[in-house]
Amino acid sequence: MSEAMLRLDDIRVAYPGPGGERTVVDHLSLSLARGTIGCLLGASGCGKTTVLRAIAGFEPLRAGRIELDGHVLSTTAATLPPERRGIGMMFQDYALFPHLDVAGNVGFGLAAQPRNVRDARIAEVLALVGLPDRAGAYPHELSGGQQQRVALARALAPSPSLLLLDEPFSNLDIDTRERLAAELRAILHRTGTTALLVTHDQAEAFAMADAIGVMDRGRILQWADAQTLYRAPADRFVAGFVGRGCVLPAAALGLPGGGDVLLRPDQLVPDDNGALRAEVLATIFRGPQHVLLLRLPEGEVAEVDVSGHAIPAPGTTLALRLADAPLVAFRRREGDAL
């Protein structure tokens, strides 16, 4: 088991308001192993950026404790200033200095080092992010993706113990975002950097992170790798937030029991001998596959991914069977996975 680099122990963050304190993060704990990439995934307002700000030292704790590499950063009694934490941060808008060239931006945090050491480190990190020939360019001369790389190089230049990334791809188009997420993951693993990302985009989370915490209302509902979140969600919220699918009564699929089941688009298979019948409501073309929107006998609507040339037309009745894979079931009242 890798050594834990970052520990958050039952932290709470709250802001003063007209009716008293408003809790934004509540009873949140996580442990991030050295050299791994973690992610807090959730909708806007769930508290994920506040967690990042608390780790960086910008928000005090109302309860709990934050440790980095065995050193206490924050408790309710004391908070280490941000500049003494050894943490790098990439912001959503990159925050590059427009009057400085690329080398000046990347070397901004290295001012205390000798000139030759600083120049060597700037060249090293620019080569690492794929911009070895852009040291003299200014931010306005770069594409969005290149600006993002410069921001990454600047964050990595001082060799931080931890890198925090606040929605780093939100200003990029989808194609650039997905490509750079995969490239950034490779760079961070190559350098052995421990990092924590916050995002609302599950594609980014899946592309980058080794471990993902799904957040809602200031709490982590499940902390796991992407495959576990998709295949074995801990509750209904995680099941609905991660991936595509729907939660249906077991009886709608001809299954015994009074609970509900999570049905992913790959868990229903068209089969002429299948016992389940559904009406095709619509077909959606998505690259090499089609998505069928189906109405099941009890009225529930589900999606099915299919490939091939014989795509059924809307209004068609389709025979289906369940795929030979385990289904996740939920209790009716508690909503926890069985």
Image: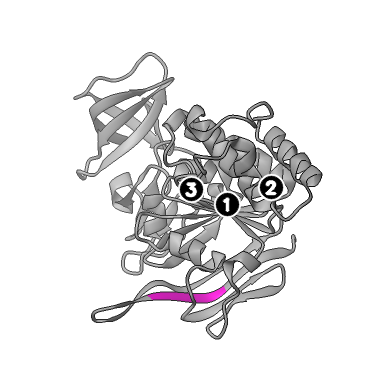
Magenta stretch encompasses residue 11 = yes
Q: How many neighbours does mark 1 have within 10 angstroms: few (below 14), some (14-19), or many (20 or more)?
A: some
Q: Foreground residue, 292 or 124?
A: 124
- Residue holding disc 2: 157
| Label 1 SS | loop
The C terminus lies in quadrant: bottom left
82 is higher (above) or lower (below) than 225: below
Q: Are marks 1 and 2 in contact (CB under 8 Å)?
A: no
From where the camera sits, is residue 178 visible? no
Q: Is residue 9 left or right of residue 250?
A: right
Give the spatial CA distance, label 1 vs label 3: 9 Å
Q: What span is in magenta?
A: 9-14
Structure colour scheme: one colour
Q: Amino acid at mark 2?
A: Ala
Q: Residue at x 54, y 60 (%)?
A: 223
Query: Where's residue 86, x and y in %?
Result: 67, 62
Q: Residue at x 36, y 33 (%)?
A: 304
Q: Residue at x 78, y 40 (%)?
A: 120
Give the mark nearest the N terminus, 1 or 3.
1
- Residue holding disc 3: 230
Give the mark nearest the N terminus, 1 or 2.
2
Query: Where's residue 42, x and y in %?
Result: 41, 55
The quadrant where residue 89 appears:
bottom right
Give the mark nearest the N terminus, 3 or 2.
2
From where the camera sits, is residue 32 visible? yes
Query: Where's residue 191, x and y in %?
Result: 73, 45
Q: Amino acid at mark 3?
A: Tyr
- Residue holding disc 1: 225
Question: Residue reaching furthest bottom?
Answer: 77
Give the spatial CA distance, label 1 vs label 2: 29 Å
In this view, the mark in front (1 or 2): 2
Q: Is residue 244 left or right of residue 70?
A: left
